[in-house]
Image (cartoon, grey):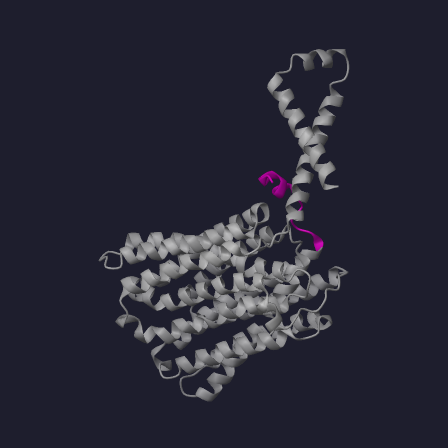
Amino acid sequence: MSLNAVLKDKIFQKEISQPFILVVNTFVWYVLTYFTLSNILTQDAFNNQSLNLFAAYFIGITVSAVVGSKLPIRRRDNLLKTWMLIGALATLLLVILSSNNIVINVIVVTFLGASIGFGLPSCLSYFAKQAKIEKRGILSGIVWSIVAFSVLALGFLGTIFGVLSLILILAAWRLLGGFGFIFLGKKQTRVEMELPKSPGYFSIIRKKETLLFLLPWVMFMVINFAEKPMLQHFFGVSQYSLVESAEFVFIGIFAFIGGLVADIGGRKRVVIAGFVMLGFEYAILSVFSNAVNTVLVSYVFMTLDGVTWGLLFSVFFTVVWGDLGEHYEKEKFYVLGGVPLLLTNFLAVFITPYAASIPLGTAFTVASFFLFAAVIPLMYAPETLPEKSLKDRDLKSYLQKAQKIVKKETAKKGVSEVKEKENEPEVEKEENNVEYDEARKLAEQYY
């Protein structure tokens, strides 16, 4: 399958506009809201409360995500509209967090967590349902490219104007996303194909193909967030924060590339490449764990980590779970894929007080080993992009070439054209014949 064949396909269609706006708005809001909450709760005034408040936040996300995934699909539009408006309100409530009242703080952060988790599975399921499977990778790549650069832009504004301004910007962003979602819903009439309800969580987990993706994904998340406090200790908190911010440039670039490649050659190759790259990243860190000057190491880490997250956000998190649930409603599949990402964030908070006592070389070496080990189940996992989608695109590409050749040959009719054709280089004739024969044979074989 050629790159041109993918790029020539019409990527955006009317029915994808509403879920596209929805997921872009949601992920930008989620990333920056968590960043804002972390900045507030890591202040000295919240030292005694921060662990409990983070726990309440993540529990709120997880419980609400499971509950939201069980709602009837016919209520999804109303759920998503309400969810986005509640998200704006929950963001604004961050201004009342105070170190003097832990009860109010717990209520606010739990409500914020619930405002994220409740509609997230439906949001991702809606996107996966409207995005055709053969274009889901590149659409997801575009989503995460926009998300990455939007996070950089809005985060930069937040650092200039302060936390309060960022809270107001995020509330406005969420509110605008909600109005955009409602407006686009009125502008277009959707005819959705009804899909069977997904099996129960235990039935999904027991499936071999789910386990082969879920185990490496959980392993990756545990390692990534457990290592975060060690990385802060290694680079220094301020340098690591700068590296984390700069990573979004690489995420934005490689999310698009990863999504494009996932539609051309399949999802597994992109996912395995991301895991291997992260394994090399921690192997390099283990070698230089005693380095005095970490500037050069930080550049290497920033590049590899940004590339890895770009590939895995666009393909693993957003695409693979939708592919696995292709014949069903996909909410429960996205809960299984999303909960590890959301919950393992808490590991970084929990481990931070002990990070200074853990040998860096050992921590990075262990991480590298398990990341390379996580590739093994992925090698046995099935390709989630159906072979039919690959063949369809191949066939379309070949037939387009054959059609051009037929037009070219037809235009050469006549005495003068025949003479020119006789003088035509043999190599070009041969290539044309080969392309036409390939198209004809593939069409005969496939149909």
Provide residue 153's location: percent of width, then percent of height. 47, 58
Q: Is residue 321 visible?
A: yes
Quadrant, the C terminus: top right
Provide residue 208's location: percent of width, then percent of height. 57, 63
* In front of the other: 83 or 183: 83
Residue beneath the point at 56% across and 73% down: 117
* In front of the other: 176 or 143: 143
Residue beneath the point at 36% across and 84% down: 48
Could you tell whether 133 is left or right of 285 in the image?
right
Residue 327 among magenta residues? no
The span shown in magenta is: 1-14
Could you tell whether 8 is left or right of 284 in the image?
right
Provide residue 80's location: percent of width, then percent of height. 65, 70
Provide residue 414's location: percent of width, then percent of height. 77, 14
Q: Is residue 404 above or below residue 270?
A: above
Name which quarter of the figure residue 220 lies in: bottom left
Quadrant, the N terminus: top right
Could you tell whether 207 is left or right of 279 in the image?
right
Residue 4 among magenta residues? yes
Q: Is residue 396 above or below residue 381?
A: above
Q: Is residue 175 visible?
A: no
Residue beneath the point at 67% across and 48% down: 388
